Image (spheres, rainbow, N blue to C red):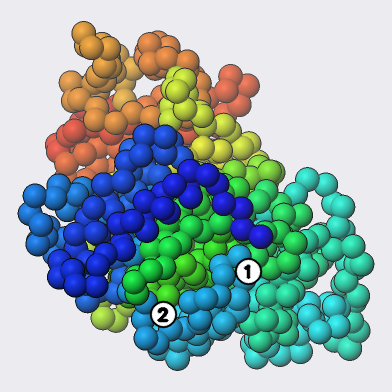
Amino acid sequence: MLEQQAPEKEVLAFMRRKIERPENETVGLYKPIYELIAIELAHLRRHKYCGNEGKLCLVILPQRFIETLEDLGKSPQPNVRSAEDVLGFLGDLMELWGFVLIEQVPTEVYYSLNDPFDKFSAQRIEPRIRKCREHHREMCSTPKAPINELYLIDCDDLTITKSKEPLEDQYIALSYVWGPGNEHASCCLSCSEDTKTPLPKNLPLLVTDAITVTKDLGFRYLWIDRFCISQDKPETKHRQIMEMDAVYSNSELTVIAAAGQDENYGLPGVSKRSRVATPAVETSGIRVSWFQNPKALVLESRWCSRGWTYQEGFLSRRRLTFLDDQTYFECGETTHYETSTRPTFLDNNFDYFNMGLSNRMNHHAEFFGLFETIILNYTARALRYDTDSLLAFAGILRHLKRSSYGFRHVWGIPWDIATPDNAPPRYYQANDIFISGLCWEHTASSWDSSRQTPRRRPMFPSWTWAGWAGIVDYLLEDYFSEVFVMGPRQFWLEGQGGLLSDVGSVAESEYSEMLRYEILVIETWAVSPDRISYEETQNGRVIWYVHDYQAERLSLSEGAASEAELAKNLKEGRFWGCVLLGRNNERVFLLILKKEESEDTWTRVGVMVLQCNVDLAHELSSEPKEYRIK
């Protein structure tokens, strides 16, 4: 049963009054549409369906009512101020919570308008999957990735079986958040292709719901990490985790459980878990629906806060997200809200409405912006174990390496990419990309009390973003296509036993081999401690200077509780240093290093960017020095 709240009933009554009109009225739909926008009932300002200003956002379908956003300003009723309001609402749609959806009841529909939205219906989703398969071949039907070992749940007999044809079997994958403990332990997988392992008898609600959805959509096989990855054999588990990019990218559909906190919540509308009401009114051939922004709900879900689920959504070619009030379908080219029968407006504005999980890379230049966005989004999520920092990202790294870009990296820092045949000539080298990859910063410094400050993950090098917990952003305006006219003389990676190797060789090696090289050795110039200064303005803003050049950015991950303490540490110079990372045509990038008294290695603790377009080499220390950064 749908649960109807009293405030919603009042709004629905208000909607009904607005859309009911005499048969001989010739004004058309514009006047009631614009009047509807003006809903600002005081007691609903903070209601969960309202926007951040207590107003409701409007989406109008089909497009023959209003062809473009600009047409919203061409109201037959020029005195109605709500026409301007709706433009502002749509412009801020990504940050709003509520939608009002007005549709003309179509003559041909994908499903009956009398079907209630309180239950999941595969009939609403199947046409989307079929359309994607048939028409989105370039974006959503890319060749499947090779996979060596794939176990699947057979939903017909509730057993786990080893796939005999990993590239041929069609299956659905499940993406969800593990709850605390291991009440529903994994099975001991059999390596034999002819042996089936029964599922445990007491399954969490999410698993039984996912099995139901899989069968309702016409599939037989389902992949769930807890049952299809060996949890009690570390070597096998690691090998399977390293193929998770292929598991999700090869699946026909990924079901995302974005409602609830863990696997015990289930999928709303499938069985025991009821859906939250979606208020709707139908009258005079018009249907008005009032629902929450699906994207906002996904971004606020616990699923979206966990690190492991990021690559699961990113790598999937099609995603069906279960929310408390509806499902949300997304592929590489389109989105579909279950509450909308005709998603034309949403389809044509995919970039505006999607969850930010799309993995589309249309041309060479987009790759750099894509990687920056990936790192920003991934590092904003939390991991239960620090040791998973790179492991939970390994699928994306493998996917990028396997793509036409031939992406190579060391510890998640880009080293080089291949240049496609149809790409314009590039003027940067692998060293430029590597320097760019080291130009990252934490969005919060160690003295920022208003935000969560970074925290070291000591099992990873400090010079990679993976060595820290905290949101990471890149400092480059032109992404990784910067050309550095000046930088360190040499880069090396130092492995176990002091073995030195060039960065390119390590980037070409296998993942396990790369992990042996933790220390970055650079030969570069240092800033003299007496040439670093700062001043505090009357409004409390701190301005830093290096050799009289003003710093436009400074970020410190750890080591000082204030900028004054940082200045003191840098002035002393014994255990702190500021060294040149690179200079392009307009800016100089400096690394801030900290040295432990008992060690001969440095820790990368921050970065500073100067507004400077001259060669600083002659102003820095006379001779470059070797720094071993761990």
Place residue 447 in its image quadrant.
top left
Q: In the rendered view, would you say 456 is above or below 598? A: below
Does the rendering let one see residue 15?
Answer: yes
Amino acid under label 2?
Answer: Met
Question: Does 67 sit left or right of 354 as displayed?
Answer: left
Disc 1: which residue: 119
Does the rendering let one see residue 303?
Answer: no
**Mark 2 nearby-residue class (10 Å; few <14, some 14–19, many ≥20):** some
Cα gap from disc 2 to disc 1, whole angstroms = 31 Å
Place residue 585 in its image quadrant.
top left
Give me the residue at 31% from left, 62% from top: 19
Question: Does 48 sit left or right of 312 as displayed?
Answer: left
Spot occupied by residue 417 in the image (x, y as percentages of width and height): 39, 67
Place residue 122 in its image quadrant.
bottom right
Residue sitting farthest toward the top: 538
Going from N to C along the chain, the mark reached first, 2 or 1, is: 1
**Mark 1 nearby-residue class (10 Å; few <14, some 14–19, many ≥20):** some
User: Which of these two is toward me, 276 or 93?
Assistant: 276
Give me the residue at 15% from left, 70% from top: 26
Amino acid under label 1?
Answer: Lys
Disc 2: which residue: 139
Give me the residue at 25% from left, 37% from top: 588
Spot occupied by residue 208 in the image (x, y as percentages of width and height): 78, 68
Which of discs 2 and 1 lies nearer the camera? The answer is: 1
Q: Which mark, by number, is residue 427?
A: none
Spot occupied by residue 299 in the image (x, y as percentages of width and height): 49, 50
User: Which of these two is toward me, 13 or 24?
Assistant: 24
